[in-house]
Structure formats: structure tokens, C-alpha cells
Amino acid sequence: MVRYGELSTKGKNRKDFIGRLCGNVERVLADLESIKIYPKHDRMHIVLNGASFEEVDKRLKKVFGIQTYSPVIRTEKTLAAIKETSLEIMQATYKVGMTFKVATKRADHRFEYDTNQLNLMVGDYLFDNLPEPKVEMKHPDLVLRIEVRQDAVYISNQLLHGPGGMPVGTAGKAVMMLSGGIDSPVASYLALKRGVDIEMVHFFSPPYTSDKALAKAKELTGILANYSGKITFIAVPFAEIQETIKEKLPEGYLMTVQRRFMLRLADMIRQKRGGLAIFNGESVGQVASQTLESMAAINNVTTTPVLRPVATMDKTEIIRLAEEIGTFELSIKPFEDCCTIFAPPRPKTKPRIDKAIEYENRLDVDGLLQRAMDGIEISTIRPNEKFIDDQTADQDLL
Ligand code: ATP
Ligand code: MG
């Protein structure tokens, strides 16, 4: 039994929420053929029909929009069946010394026993049949929940936590600027968590960056695809732009102008793909390109909302989350991406917008953008898809 998050959503939004969640759950469970899914307005039932709960449990942990869920046994609406099923569930989890209580909820008010009667009768039955039982009302180790509904009775004694958030897709589409670093995968996770259907935009610079830097970004996308089923990955060639900027502009503005080009390209791709916003992994003050002055100078190329989920997080907080979602290990592999290679030793921490524009006037901005757009490569990445060949990767690191 799956309970929904963000219960404040109502009306059409609620229908959309449930519809998306159902589709997303169906997708992550697609290969478990016996399973049937029944979405209702206040909860979803996933009937296992013999499928392993452990397997389903592992996957539901990554489906946004799920607040809590419980392995539940559905039983007929007779006192005898309720008692037997309750005992069966308790015997599977109860250990000597544990305390418990029974908590009944009744949606069907015509059922012959009320909640107090059921709590007492089932409690007594368990008390007589469990070894050394101990009842505790305030903070019991186990709560046996009995829900009497119109169609049947549902019984469980576990309450598991889902990831919360909103089903991916309910918030619309956006592009995510994904590097191979630590921060942007975490920002991606947080965007997905709010229901945003993201498409990855990754800038790469062959021959200055290796195939492995590209493979790393793709493999990170594969880890994140566990949270959404699949993710579109858009690789944008960036070498010509970087070479040109390096040749023609003063060093202090290399970084600012490069970033302005990246943002323009991300915005062009967003528009083509029907997205509404751009996400990135910037964190205030972390490096020269992420001071507020830098962000203002870079952001000046577009009025599209640029959202920064990790803007206010400390590096240690970002790392903790990266470890939790499983991207950290891969993020710290040292395959340099396009930014590290053309990074000037002393970028301006307070670049001026008018200066950036003045320098860009020396360049064929539209031609550079157009050629980069002509070279983009689009692919679809599935959960846990692998791109880095481990042996060659290890050799590289030696
Ligand atoms: P990250 O860990 O995400 O790489 P960072 O702290 O290293 O972040 P930068 O490298 O300065 O920061 O990049 C800031 C943001 O710009 C990134 O979080 C990402 O959103 C975007 N970005 C940087 N490099 C690329 C790239 N090669 N392709 C796409 N986006 C990029
Ligand atoms: Mg980086």
C-alpha cells in the first residue's frame, strides 16, 4: 500500500500527480510481470502476486511522490480472518521482549465492530498467542495497523519511508547543465525530486577532453535515471568556442565569457526541446564563477529562469547527498571535463557585464553558437547504463 506525498495537491493537479506516479511506478516495476497496480484517489495498491517484496521495496525507495508505504496483507471482512492474518504478520516480525499495540481505522462504518472493539479483540488474541507479549500504548516497538475498508481489510505492521517529493513529470520539462563534477548530479537529483523532467546538456571538448570525460557524464546520468526511468542526454561540442575565446579575449574574462556561451547554448536547446527552465549545479561563493557578481554577469544572456538547487548548500552537505544517491564515487574520478582544461589561473571574481559584452563583440557569436548546435548528439540513457570501460579507466588513473 503506497501513500502519496504533498497531500495538499487537489483537483486536476491531484489527478495528474496520481497518473504520473502510477506511470512511474509501472515503469520501474515493468519487468516483474506478476504485479498489478491499482491507483486510487488516496493511495495506490500494488498487488505482488508472488513477486518479491524486497525487490519492489528497493525500487519504490527511488520513486518521487511516494511518502510512505507498507507491505500489507488483504483479508476478508470477518473477525476470524482478521485475527488469523494479524497473528501471521506479528509472528513474522515480533521478537520476545518487544512491545506492541493494535491500531484500527474504519472507513466502512457499517462493519459490525467498531475500532475499540477490534483493538481489544485482536489485541487479546495476539496476547494469548505470542510468546511473552508486552503491550505498550505510547511508544510501542510494533504497531499493527488494521484498516477496514469497503472492499476488504488491510493489515500491516511496517511503515516504510519513500523519498517524498513530486512524481517526475508533474512539474514540466527543463534542461540540466550536467558536468562530471560532484555538484550538478546532486542538483539533478533535487530537480527530479520536485517533479521536473530534466534533459541533460553536457559540454565536451574533444580533442582536449578524453572520451572518458564524456563517458563519465553519461554514466552519472545512468545513476540518476534510477529516479526517472530514463534521461535524454545531449552532448554539445565546445572546443571551437573555447579555442576562439582563449585566442581573442583577455584571460580575466575567459571564464565569464565561456559560461555565457554555455548558458546561451543551454537556452537554445531548452527552447528547441520545449523546456521551461535551466538547472545547474552552482553553489554561491564556491569558486570564482559562482560569486553573485559572476552569476549576474553570466545570467545576463537570458531571461529564462535559471534554477540552482544546491545554491545555498555547503560542499560537505552536497557531498553527503552525493554519497547517499550513489554519484560521489564516480564524480571524483579524475577525468577532466572541458572547464578544468581551459580554466584561467586567475579568473575575475567580480566580472563586469559591460566588459563581457564588449569583448564578445570581437567574436562571431552567432556563428560559433550555430556550429555548436549543428554538432549536438542526442541519446537516451537507461538506469545504471555503463559507459566507462573499467580496465582502461583504471590504467588511466595509475
Ligand atoms: P560540478 O561539480 O557540478 O562540476 P563545480 O562546483 O565543479 O560543479 P563548475 O565546474 O564551476 O562548478 O560548474 C558550475 C556549473 O556549471 C556546474 O554545476 C554545471 O551545472 C555547469 N557546468 C560546468 N561544466 C559543465 C559541462 N562541461 N557541461 C555542462 N554543464 C557544465
Ligand atoms: Mg565542475
Image (spheres, rainbow, N blue to C red):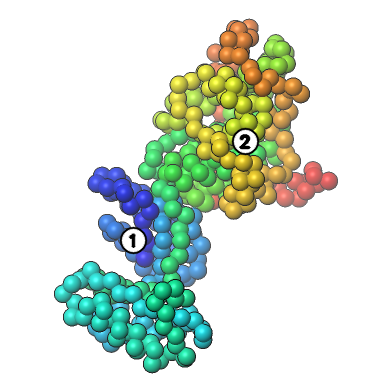
Side (left or right) of 357 relative to 153: right
SS type, badge 1: strand
Q: Position of residue 273 (x, y in %)?
A: 44, 30
- Element at label 2: loop
| Residue drawn at point x = 41 percent, y = 70 percent | 71
The amino acid type, in three-letter code, at marker 1 is Met
Quarter for ligand 1?
top right
Q: Give me the disc on residue 179.
A: 2
In the image, is residue 206 above or below residue 57? above
Answer above or below: position of 54 versus 64: below
**Quarter of the view holding residue 272:** top left
Image mark count? 2
Q: Is ligand 1 less than 8 Å from the beta carbon at label 2? A: yes
Rounded to the nearest whole Å, what is the CA distance between mark 1 and mark 2? 37 Å
Residue drawn at 54 percent across, 47 percent down = 224
Q: Is residue 289 visible?
A: yes
Q: Position of residue 262 (x, y in %)?
A: 58, 24
